[in-house]
Image: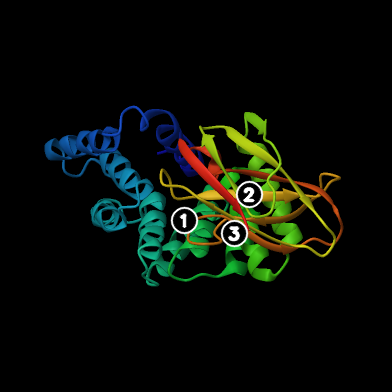
Amino acid sequence: MLGRYSDALRDYTRVTAFVLPGHPEAEQEIIAGYKARLEQVPDDVTALTGLSFAYWYFFDYAAAIHVLERLVDVVPDDTYGNLFIGSSRFLRGRAAGATDLERAIELAPSSPDVHFIVADAYTYGAVVDPQRAFDEATTALEGGLDTPRIRAIRASSYLAFGDGAAAAREIDIHLDLVTTQLVVTSPLAAGSSTNLAVVPGRTYEIPIAVAAGESVSILTSSKDFIDTILALLAPNGTPVVGSDDFKGYFAGVEWVAPAAGTYRLRVTSFESVSTGTLSVVRN
């Protein structure tokens, strides 16, 4: 309600990290609570906002659009309503959401949170525009939102621009922002794999010994969650390659080592909010 959409997203990631593993019905309970309020007061702006944001966060964009349409009928110039109906339409695959996003910017041009949601839409939605996403994410960053997702959006844009080194730096910052426990493993040899127990805040660092000119192929996967992120660091600690959505939402690397040495692979779930087993395969 204060327009701090990035903070709201952060709080829902905490629900994913700390509530859902032991209370998997929490999503349904949150939604049911808002619905009960709306049965009593159908035009309750706070409840419409809360319900639509819950649907948006849990990827039910069709339901979010339905609620947001009611919200903008009640408050046509509501920044949140215009912004998130545009985002939901984009994320559901509808280019028509662009008009709503532009309206939200008109309503709150100086809000870094608005620019962040627009950047997210142009990264993951129906109209993928890396330059627009980068510009909007950079505006949000310069406005004070230095968050893991902002860094991931900028990394995605850099990858689209063909600047792998810059993308790796952004992903490395993402990992720094989400890591509360760094666990160093035994080295991962070519042709081998490892299974890692992931919990919120835990990032793994895996030594990768390579020869000069060697092709390195690394894939991640999980049966417990759908999104991973990684960065490969040179022996001197410089990020050299990074990955977010390499195969679906799983990170991976295909890279040729310019010099021999022991590199370090840093890997976890996206925003480090998931619990489960993460598989890393080096082909």
Q: On residue 107, which mark appears? A: 1
The residue at the point 40 percent across, 65 percent down is: 90
Residue 79 is situated, as x and y percent measured from the top left of the image, at 41, 52
Q: Residues within 10 Å of mark 1 (few under 14, many from 20)?
A: some
Task: Tell me the element at label 2.
Answer: strand
- Residue position for label 2: 230
Q: Earlier in the sequence, mark 1 or mark 3?
A: 1
The residue at the point 62 percent across, 50 percent down is: 192
CA gap between label 1 and label 2 equals 37 Å
Is disc 1 in contact with disc 2, using a CB cutoff of under 8 Å?
Answer: no
- Residue position for label 3: 136
**Residue 144 higher or lower than 89, as above or below:** above
Q: Nearer the viewer, residue 93 or 235?
A: 235
Q: Earlier in the sequence, mark 3 or mark 2?
A: 3
Q: Is residue 158 left or right of residue 32?
A: right
The residue at the point 55 percent across, 38 percent down is: 196
Q: Nearer the viewer, residue 154 or 181?
A: 181
Task: Tell me the element at label 1.
Answer: helix
Q: Amino acid at mark 1?
A: Leu
Question: Which dot, 1 or 3, sits closer to the camera?
Answer: 3
Q: Earlier in the sequence, mark 1 or mark 2?
A: 1
Task: Tell me the element at label 3.
Answer: helix
Q: Amino acid at mark 3?
A: Glu
